[in-house]
Amino acid sequence: MVKVIIVGSQKDKWNIGGKLKAIRAIARILDKYNPKQVLVGSGECPNGGIDKWVERLALGKGFTFIGYPPEVNAWNDKWIPYQDFIKENPHKVTTLHNWKCIKCGMKRSGSFERNQLICPKCGIPMYIRARGYKYRNTLMAKEGEELYSIDPKGVWSGGRWTIRHAKKLGKIVHQIEIDQ
Ligand SMILES: [Zn+2]
């Protein structure tokens, strides 16, 4: 299956007219593809906007949707205590990687197991490397065969960053500018 990624500006960058145009643009893109041959992915941005609209429309048109949510609301990855991570990412608990004790520096990686929650040496909670926007954008650029970013004209977004990165990787990319 070919993976098509559609990303772009978050909700607060759009006015009502721009939002309608953006949703029409998403629909036009999706109508080029066959739900039996194409997977649709987006960034599940916690601030809504294009990512949310893509998810809703793709599911409505019968596509399988793949979300790439950031694990932490930050551009770079961040070490956070495992309890905080699990609160923010309840669906991720079986696939955690990159553990560290911030006291003794002991590192481990691998799947989540109950006995990994506490550092055996120090007896304090382990920290987890939560992936930020940069990591997830890079991942979408890597995994998508064809990528779109939909943005108001002149507005910078993580979507534009993703598209530029994907272009460097030789992917087919489309920057859609919306007049609003
Ligand atoms: Zn330790």
Image: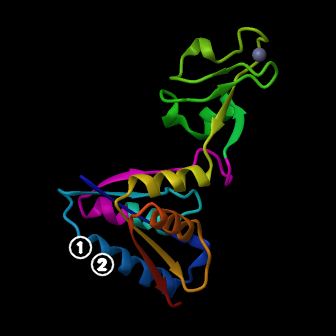
Q: Examine the rendered structure and indicate whether residue 139 appears above or below residue 79.
A: below
Q: Residue furthest top?
A: 121
Q: Is residue 5 left or right of residue 112?
A: left
* Residue of label 2: 28
| Residue at x 71% of width, y 35% of height | 80
- Is residue 63 part of the magenta span, yes or no? yes
Residue 9, percent from left and from top: 55, 71
Q: Examine the rendered structure and indicate whether residue 32 appears above or below residue 137.
A: below
Separation (CA) of disc 2 from disc 1? 7 Å
Residue 158, percent from left and from top: 58, 65
The number of numbered badges drawn on the structure is: 2
Classify 10 Å Cα crowding around label 2: few (below 14), some (14-19), many (20 and above): few
The disc label shown at residue 32, or none: 1
Label 1 amino acid?
A: Lys
Distance from mark 2 CB to nearest ligand 1 atom below 8 Å: no
Image quarter where ligand 1 lies: top right
Q: Is residue 167 left or right of residue 130?
A: left
- Provide the secondary structure element on which disc 2 rests: helix
| Residue at x 23% of width, y 73% of height | 32
- Is residue 45 part of the magenta span, yes or no? no
Q: Residue furthest bottom?
A: 179
| Residue at x 51% of width, y 34% of height | 92
Q: Are marks 2 and 1 in contact (CB under 8 Å)?
A: yes
Relative to the observer, which residue lies in front, 32 or 60? 32
- Give the magenta-colored segment's residue range: 56-76
Label 2 amino acid?
A: Arg
Q: Is residue 125 left or right of residue 59?
A: right
Relative to the observer, which residue lies in front, 55 or 162? 162
